Image (cartoon, helix red, strand yellow):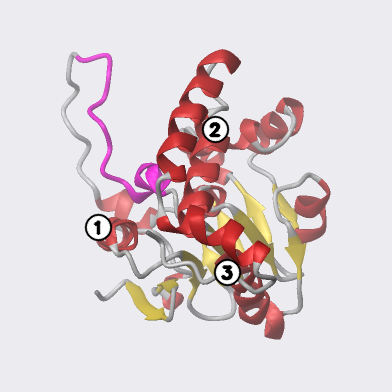
Amino acid sequence: METVIYEKRGRVAYVTLNRPQALNAINRQMMADLAEVWREVQVDVDVWVAILTGAGERAFSAGADLKEAAQRVPEAQRAVFWAEPSESPLEIGRELWKPVIAAINGYALGGGLTLALSCDVRIAVPQAQLGFPEVRWGVPTIVGAIRLPRLVPLGVALEILLTGDTIDAEQAARWGLVNQIVPSDDLMPAAERIAGRLLQSAPIAVRVTKEMALRGLTLPQADAVRLGESLRRLVRETADAAEGPRAFAEKRPPHYQGR
């Protein structure tokens, strides 16, 4: 793939947006490559955690490639009220129950910030800049406008979305958009330390917990509890569910296999 670098090291998948000359702006080819990568991460039983970052030292992703968008011929207006489901990795990522860490190494704007918000843990360098500038260019923010109010207070989300202003890493941390701020040379090591902590837990239990946390946001509490109990019963039948208590009783670290 020309726009995304994908590699595996042990149980960790490394996904790198690879258009540094364009601040890793997301064009059609990158969208297609990312969709392929997330599907691979989703089905690969040997991958338990993923780390997403951008190539170069300036940007995680500056968002949509506006130069490409300016050359695009507008589609004919269609008399439909509902768009067909998107194949964008921005949507696919919501169905990826394996944990994903965003290592934000610079600008995370527009679709780039939407990508970061699709991750479960976000760490950033001090010089990172985050925001949704789309409205300043005549384009509404859609997926980011769905996700952001679920992470920060509504007033904060609307200020970011409607002004198009960027915020620095410190402000993002105060508002809960990033978990940690680390020096540039410690960004990937910090992401790997978090990945290492995640790998200590049973992977199936981690995925079910993530799924419940996200699905529970949109379900009535009673329905969420019913779903949770059903998933809990399924997890109880796994080998890992037996290994955890056995390791505790034997006073040793558990050896999980994802089964």
Q: CA distance from mark 1 to mark 3?
A: 38 Å
Residue at the image position 71 percent from the left and 26 percent from the top: 154
Q: In the image, what residue type sits under mark 1?
A: Ala
Please identify the quadrant where the N terminus is shown: bottom left
Give x and y (percent) for residue 138. Answer: 47, 35
Q: Which residue is mark 1?
A: 32
Q: Report crowding for label 3: few under 14, some 14 to 19, many 20 or more residues within 10 A (C-alpha).
A: some
Q: Which residue is mark 3?
A: 254
Give x and y (percent) for residue 68. Answer: 30, 56
Q: Which residue is mark 2?
A: 145
Q: Which mark is residue 63?
A: none
> Is residue 43 among what the camera can see?
yes
Q: CA distance from mark 3 to mark 2?
A: 41 Å
Q: In the image, what residue type sits under mark 2?
A: Ala
Left or right, 213 with reference to 143: right
Quarter assignment of residue 40: bottom left
Where does the magenta region start and end?
A: 80-96
Which one is in front, 211 or 156?
211
Give x and y (percent) for residue 54. Answer: 50, 71
Left or right, 7 with reference to 244: left
Kind of element beneath mark 1: helix
Left or right, 218 with reference to 131: left
Instruction: Looking at the image, tell me whether mark 3 or mark 2 is earlier in sequence order.
Output: 2
